[in-house]
Image: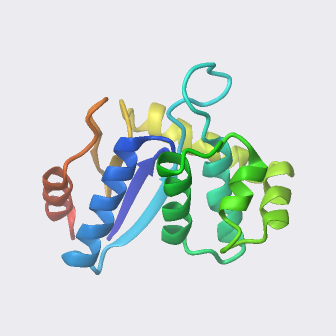
Amino acid sequence: MKLELYLDYGCPFCLKGYHEVIALIVEEFCDLELKIVPCEAHPRPETHGLHTDICARGFYVAGDYGCNPIEYSDIIFKASLKDKVDIENVDVVADALANIIEPDDFIEGIEKGDYVDRLKENNEKAWETLGFPAVPSLKMGASTLPAVPGVGLTRGQIKKFIKANKA
């Protein structure tokens, strides 16, 4: 069974939810396939909030180079929320990822516009199709677990959701 985790790399609630999901998979649900679905809480042209489009599109660019999605996400969350680097600057993001992808390859993938449409699809699915009010939010089969705005998801909620929807 596949668990889809919708997240924004600039969201502290997403960081917490991401860590809870990873821990539960390692500790109890090792047969569960995790699909990370990066989306944006504040997509352009919104003028407020942190724009995380480079990080979200970069998830797929890095994947093209064989980067592990968990390792990528760990680095980006650290850069964004712990180190407070400027994740709206492609050069800064590329430097943060230098241990897993050549910065020039990353920058080229972003500048070519790779995955602009994919990110738009992720945003539409999260906010319009699934109607999530906030992230992190989960989808498993036909069921969803939307985050509470300003709260996120608890470990208990995530565990209960996975147990209820495992085939």
Most extreme residue toward the top, as rendered?
A: 47
- What residue is drawn where x is 13% and y is 54%? 156
Q: Quadrant of the C terminus?
A: bottom left
**Would residue 159 be found to the left or right of residue 121 on screen?**
left
Toward the viewer: 128 or 68?
A: 68
**Residue 4 seen from this side:** yes
27 or 95: nearer the eye?
95
Q: Position of residue 22 (x, y in %)?
A: 33, 67
Residue 103 percent across, percent down from the top left: 79, 64
In the image, residue 31 sits, relative to residue 114, either above or below, namely below
Q: Is residue 43 left or right of residue 65?
A: left
Left or right, 144 with respect to 36, comes to left
Question: What's the image's color scheme?
Answer: rainbow
Residue 140 to residue 98: above or below:
above
- Let me know if residue 9 appears in the view: no
Q: Residue at x 60, y 43 (%)?
A: 121
How many callouts does the rendering have?
Answer: 0
Task: Give the vertical position of 110 relative to 134 (above or below).
Answer: below
Quarter-wise, where is residue 163 in the image? Answer: bottom left
- The residue lying at 63 percent from left, 40 percent from top is 120
* Residue 65 image point, x, y percent: 72, 74
Q: Find residue 123 and report its image quarter.
A: top right
Residue situated in front as seen by the camera: 44 or 124: 44
x then y, percent, for residue 45: 68, 23
Q: Residue at x 60, y 31 (%)?
A: 43
Q: Quadrant of the N terminus?
A: bottom left
Residue 103 vs residue 119, the one in the foreground: 103
